[in-house]
Amino acid sequence: MSTTPNTAVPPSDSESLEPGIATVEAVATVEKNPYGLSPSLYNQDLAPTKRAGRTWRSYSIFTLWANDVHSLGNYAFAIGLFALGLGAWQILLAILLGGALLFVLLNLSGFMGEKTGIPFPVMSRIAFGTVGAQIPALIRGVVAIAWFGIQTYLASVVLRIMIIALVPAAADLDENRFLGLSTLGWIAFVSLWALQLYIVSHGMEMVRKYEAFAGPVILVTLSALAVWMLIEADGSIALSTPDAKTGLAMWLSIFGAASLWVSIYATFVLNFCDFTRGATSKKAIVRGNFYGIPLNMLVFGLIVVALAGGQFAIDGTVIESPADVVQAIPSTALLVLASAALMILTIAVNLMANFVAPIYALNNLFPKVLDFRRAAYITAVIGLIILPWNLYNSPAVITYFLGGLGALLGPLFGIIMADYWLIRRARINVIDLYRDRPESTYHYRRGYNPRAVAALIPTATIAMLLAFVPAFSVVSNFSWFIGAGLGVVVYLLLADRTRTHEDVSGEPIAVASTGH
């Protein structure tokens, strides 16, 4: 990762100089910037990655999912299915169906990063134009920054519980309030906030190492919780609740849950190339995704069944998340260890899902003055000053602001995938992604592709209506798929099919991947 902005020098308007000076200036410009890259589009962190030296292998990609799949939010969602009347096999089927769909979608998205070596904001230039790419990048970035703060707050709640368990006197620091948090709350939040900033400020390689460390910790901890619950329940678990659904209602709930399971990953499916730009091969992506998605999700589902079914067999109640199980552990030492593991998990999920995307979005917005580290600092500061605990406690913000922006991710995904795979058939002139000349491939009209914008407007409107209008509640569970499908169809109707598409490698302007 570069610590100072390193931009390419654009061509000068040498015609305005005297003939002799113009010749010297033109020669110097070509030597410094032979590919005519624009400093408003290119720096060391937005540049494509060299193939040599890439470090994201199958295990690295697997550990992304080992962490993200086992997030507390996912457990709350899946256990909620048990409470809503789905039994063990129905929950497992819903999770596996969602996992199979995700496996396909993530491979399509991941291959784009592996081939080109570029991050998501630059990838968006292909369909939306060199300037228009700010639209999907900023939508993804704003959602991520808000959730970065919220997830950090949720992790800090676990840390507060752990601190009080270790030092009961610390409970006195949890009585007052300043800007919505107690003194202990501020200590816990800022500590975890600073830890995440430290990790990310050292670049994507440090993120990869942290994910690799956290993955096994999470799998062992949650598997141990499931075994402990089975022991507590004397090996007997409830496979369903008395009000279990049957017939058509059951199948609609299964398919709806599978669709929502995919929607949970809507943000990450969109910018998976931020990680796979460092992948060693397509095979590494497929293997990492296979072991990390369908197979890992099966393990996740079994843990959900053990935790929810075990607790229901014990006392007839349905837990809300693994945190409920942790709080019931009678040993302080084990409770602290389990709480620490849950914090490690939350940080791992936050780094990959909510911290990296806004860093690249800000970098893309101000490439002349920002690099990865500076963009990380800005992201972290915004995540702090928005006082995310207030956002989390505001249903209007979560539903209408974050939910509304989230509804746009389906159409964006559909448009970007249709353009890359169906219109261009993966033929990309990577070098042209960093040129702002009118004749460059992705300049379109003043840097915007009007066809992509025109496809986004109606599909985004429909996606928002499906998300918020009660009359469409029957299909609201499928809103991401409907939005993505409409994005594909409308863009294919509007796309320019008269252009020829060159496949030009970005290797001549690429940088080492280990710093990103």
Image: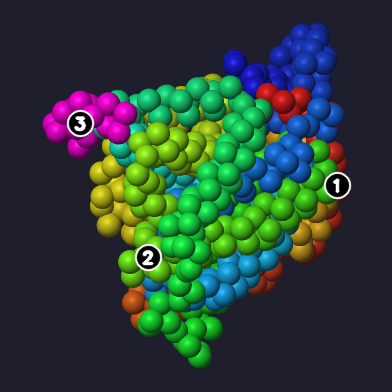
Colour scheme in the image? rainbow
Q: Secondary structure at mark 3?
A: helix
Q: Is residue 370 visible?
A: no
Q: Nearer the viewer, mark 1 or mark 3?
A: 3
User: Upstream in the sequence, badge 3 or badge 2?
Assistant: 3
Amino acid on which disc 2 is placed:
Ile
Contact check, label 1 and label 2, Cβ < 8 Å: no
Q: Which of the 4 quarters of the picture holds residue 180?
A: top left
Task: Find the magenta span and give its range.
Answer: 164-181
Between the residue at mark 1 and the residue at mark 2, the CA separation in whole angstroms equals 61 Å
- Where does the image place residue 289, in percent across and percent down from the top left? 71, 52
- Say which residue appears at 52% left-offset and 72% top-offset: 88
Quadrant location of the N terminus in the rendered image: top right
Amino acid on which disc 1 is placed:
Asp
| Residue that carries the numbered disc 3 in the rendered image | 171
Q: Which of the 4 quarters of the picture holds residue 241?
A: bottom left
In this view, the residue in front, 184 or 32, is 184
User: Upstream in the sequence, badge 1 or badge 3?
Assistant: 3
User: Upstream in the sequence, badge 1 or badge 2?
Assistant: 2
Q: Which mark is residue 503?
A: 1
Q: Nearer the viewer, mark 3 or mark 2?
A: 2
Q: Secondary structure at mark 1?
A: loop
Q: Is residue 214 visible?
A: yes
In this view, the residue in front, 381 or 64, is 64
Q: Secondary structure at mark 2?
A: helix
Amino acid on which disc 3 is placed:
Ala
Q: Which of the 4 quarters of the picture holds residue 217?
A: top right
- Where does the image place residue 112, in percent across and percent down from the top left? 74, 49
- Say which residue appears at 39% left-offset and 52% top-offset: 325
| Residue that carries the numbered disc 2 in the rendered image | 314
In this view, the residue in front, 314 or 46, is 314
